[in-house]
Image (cartoon, rainbow, N blue to C red):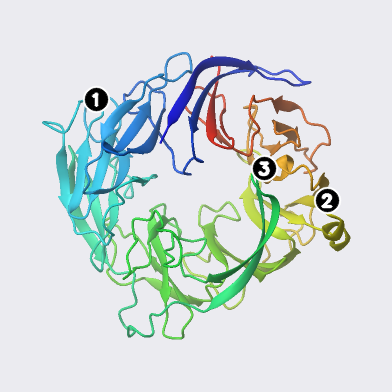
Amino acid sequence: MKLTFTGLVIYTLLSGAVFAQSSYVAFKLERENNWERQLAFEDLNGDGRKDIIHSNYQAGIGRELHVFHQQADGSFSTTAQRIEIKTETIAVAFADLRATPGTEILLISNSGVFSLSSALEGYRDNIKQLLEWELIAAIPDLERVQFITGLEDIDEDGEIDLLLPGDGVYGLFKGRGNEIFELVSTFSTGNESLSAVQRGRPNSSMDARIAINAEEGIVIELNIESDSYFDGFVEQWDANKEPASSLLRAESWMPTAITAQLNADTLTDIAYINQGADGLGQLNFHFQNAQNKFNSEPDWTGSIATQGDIQLVDMDNDKRLDLLRVTGEGNDRSAYFYRNQNGTFDLEQPSQVMRFSGYDVRLNIIQLEKNSGPLLNVSYYTIPVVDVIRNASINRSQLIFGSEDAGENEIFNRRPDSRLDESFSAANVRGLSEQMSLQYDIDGDGRKDAVFVTENGTLAAKKINQDLTIESQQFWEYVSPNTVFEFQVLHLNRDSKPDLLLRHGTATTFLVAAP
């Protein structure tokens, strides 16, 4: 696979307004095919600047990690550091485990976990086995390395801990420092009280969604999908599709456990969904106890239908995760909000229900400022029937719901505090390649902005006013040499300035705010 790069280039912000961040240092990576979604950003050499890491495969060489180190001026090294990945490695993670500066690479195989320093060349006198553990995982993908990000200090003692799926059980390995890990808890996420027949997969359903991409433009997709307990909550495996990049890729699958803060204490807990005796999904919680361990059996369970997308998110700023379930077919979606009741949920009686009509309906809980109240942002596309026939236009809607006027026991206002509707020509889909996002502070002023791709393929932003309306005029625009289809706002160093990731057709551009 051919890969090229463009090194240090200073791009100036084009905007009618002026603020402190006026230029970026750009670094572009190009490939013959579209980038896989997974990139890692880690400070491997301990200089306080995050490096770009991606998996690479070349016939005759095999799998490697390619590392582009960030320089003091915000540029990246023009030649990648290449780190061999042995064939037995299933996935890699990153954690600061050794006394030497920088983050180590964790090599996860079917027999255990090993650490490797990127500061030393090769494996000799470098690799160290951290623990033995038989993973529930497939034979490694010989052309791709799966990244596992977000390792946590689960017991908050300053050391990274490892939660690993094993042969029938999960194991929590407590980090003791000096690359020593101890198995302290085990539990199974499968419901062993059910027979193998009862553990079968849920029924299939038909789903409709809108797809927008550079090659095909606007496409309405009708898909027959098998509902999974994993959807929107954890990773899933589908035997009818290309192999998934999941650590739990196995014909004999086991529901994935995730970490979450669920009750009144400040300790991290564990959640997963399996199947209950009633045929519905069963939500399970294990609460971390005072000894920083978990019981083998769940501390709380609740029955919940698993069709649709299920996620845990803090909706009311009480530091405990609530539950959001979104269901529907075609262009009709229903959102069910369940408030956390100190580690339990009344799953038969949602705190609130909302209904929306549109394609690609997305719900996000946001805070405009650090200490402001929670807001619900809903975005979707609509296509008027007459316009479908004429192939004329598509509408994009942004709704913002506050919480000040919410009804008793409800979380958000019943009606949106603001609404922004935009119409786009079907002949020009660049502005529809990515939903407008209210998740990012693009100018670093401490308040979220409405960031979006324009019809010209540039990245722009509008201010969100105190009354929650989105201003009609953009205050910021970044004009890229390549059309922007997707974007992320990152923090790639220790300054307070937001950095950017822009995805193009077969390239990704990284923009570091110039010092």
Marks 3 and 1 sit apart, C-alpha to C-alpha, by 39 Å
Asked whether residue 192 is in view, the answer is yes
Q: Position of residue 6 (x, y in %)?
A: 50, 21
* Amino acid type, mark 1: Ala
Q: Compare marks 2 and 3 and give the one earlier in the sequence.
A: 2
Q: Position of residue 367 (x, y in %)?
A: 64, 44
Q: Which residue is mark 1?
A: 119
Question: Which one is closest to the eye, mark 3 or mark 1?
Answer: 1
In front of the other: 94 or 465: 94
In front of the other: 111 or 35: 35
Q: Tell me the element at label 3.
A: strand
Q: Are marks 3 and 1 in contact (CB under 8 Å)?
A: no
Extreme residue in the front direction: 60
Q: Are marks 1 and 2 in contact (CB under 8 Å)?
A: no
Quadrant that contains the N terminus = top left
Q: Which residue is mark 3?
A: 438
Marks 1 and 2 sit apart, C-alpha to C-alpha, by 54 Å
* Amino acid type, mark 3: Leu
User: What number is the disc on residue 393?
Assistant: 2
Q: Tell me the element at label 2.
A: strand
Task: State the image quarter where residue 192 is shown.
Answer: bottom left
How many C-alpha atoms fall within 10 Å of the one at disc 1: few (<14), some, or many (≥20)?
A: some
